[in-house]
Amino acid sequence: MRGLSGVLLLALSVSFLACRAPGEGTASDSGAGGPDAAGLAGGDGGTWYRDVLPIVQDHCQQCHVPGGVGPFPLVTYQDGFTHNTLMASAVQQALMPPWKPQEGCQSFVGDRSISQALRNTIINWSAAGAAEGNPADAPPPPDAGFLGLPHVDLELDAGFDYTPSQANGPDDYHCFILYPGQGATPQATTQDVTGVNIVPGHTSLVHHVILFQTTLAKALAAEAATPGQGWTCFGSPGTGDFNMVGGWVPGSPPQVFPAGTGVPLLAGNVVVMQVHYNMATVGAQPDRTLAQLAFSPTPVPRPAQILGPIDTSFIIPPNAQGYTDSMTITVPTALTIWGVQPHMHTKGTEISVNMTDPSGHSTCLADIPQWNFHWQQMYFYTAPLSVAAGTTVTLQCTWNNPTAQAVRFGEGTADEMCLAFFYATK
């Protein structure tokens, strides 16, 4: 049993080119360049507007929208027709939609998993010619905020392009000061952040982004200690005292925090944006990543923080298959948890988080039996979970290590991690 000190982190990492199936890609995947007249009515195969669009809205458009993380949009009929055979193949093989939590563990907001009946609807529609049907049959458009933040109150920009350094190998963790006040000034008054979206400048280069907050003096001191723009910041922002505001990984949709909650951005603080660049596939190229924040117009009743267990002691043996490590912590004070985000790197295969209350009752918090590095996000519960003081939380991770070297906890993409972040309130 490990103590809580040192493993409850005010940080959020997270996930990666989600919403993309292997081979998912171009308009040429569909075959013909447009629907033929015989396919417009639909017949027994169904139609886009009546049968397929409702499924796409509920299960695909979190990623497949213009500017989304999906490699192409699925908004119009032409979008659907162009990619109809690819859609059918992806759902038939259960590659899409990307939803990794095991059914039966917890109920999550925005569950993209679909039944076999809905998969068959898409498969049959495509096989019958991908008919358009009557636009009057289309469902209402999604609610505002479904495809992104409901509103953007502040967009933060470091003010310059940055080309990552390869001095430390293919990974560069770099921090930038983002000034939330007018001009180069800190936050004027405390405001509660209710949503976070990251707009990476170079999606093939940006591995993940974490937003921290700290005082202006500490941020300036960290920047002054390193020549050039920003500073190297492996692990933490290197400012000493700091708190997490939010984060992003490829495939993670914009984070909209549960109603009545928010992360306070304190008066006098600035935002430090930590960007993890990985140059293993694309090399060093200029990047200018932006951060978007939504604020509550009034103070939220449930201020939140992001925290959770992190296992740093594992050593995965060379050529190991199915190697498992676990850790257990004890929660010292009562909490309410609203969401969970498990995290590993590319060698991970399974991850689970469970808690046992002082009476001995166990609850599954997250279970991902088929881990995929490219499909990660914060999963918010449909109803928050109460955690009593003295509850134990167990984190378990499993990896395959195909290399001839032992693999340990580390910040690089070729290293590994085992952690889970909770969005929590008192």
Image (cartoon, grey):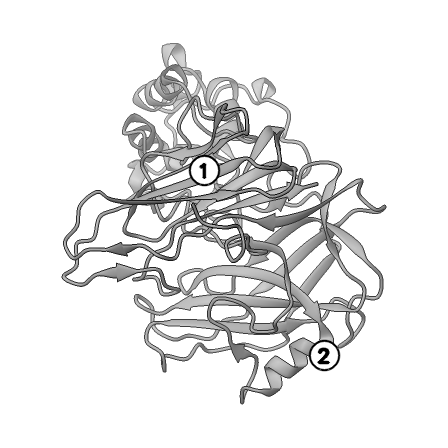
Helix, strand or loop status at disc 2: helix
Q: Nearer the viewer, mark 2 or mark 1?
A: 2
The residue carrying mark 1 is: 79
- Would residue 6 appear left or right of 91 to someone viewing this image? right
Q: Which mark is residue 213?
A: none
Question: In which quadrant is the N terminus drawn?
Answer: top left
Question: How dense is the environment of label 1, judged by Cα within 10 Å: few (below 14), some, or many (20 and up)?
Answer: some
**Residue 75 visible in the picture:** no
Q: Amino acid at mark 2?
A: Ala
Quarter residue 358 falls in? top right
Q: Position of residue 113 (x, y in %)?
A: 43, 27
- Would residue 421 appear left or right of 28 to someone viewing this image? right
Q: Amino acid at mark 1?
A: Asp
Q: Position of residue 263 (x, y in %)?
A: 70, 50
At horizontal 43% and vertical 39% (from top left) the residue drawn is 394
Q: Earlier in the sequence, mark 2 or mark 1?
A: 1
Q: Position of residue 328 (x, y in %)?
A: 43, 43
- Pick the front one: 276 or 284: 276
The residue carrying mark 2 is: 217
At horizontal 55% and vertical 60% (from top left) the residue drawn is 210
Quarter residue 29 falls in? top left
- Pick the front one: 85 or 288: 288
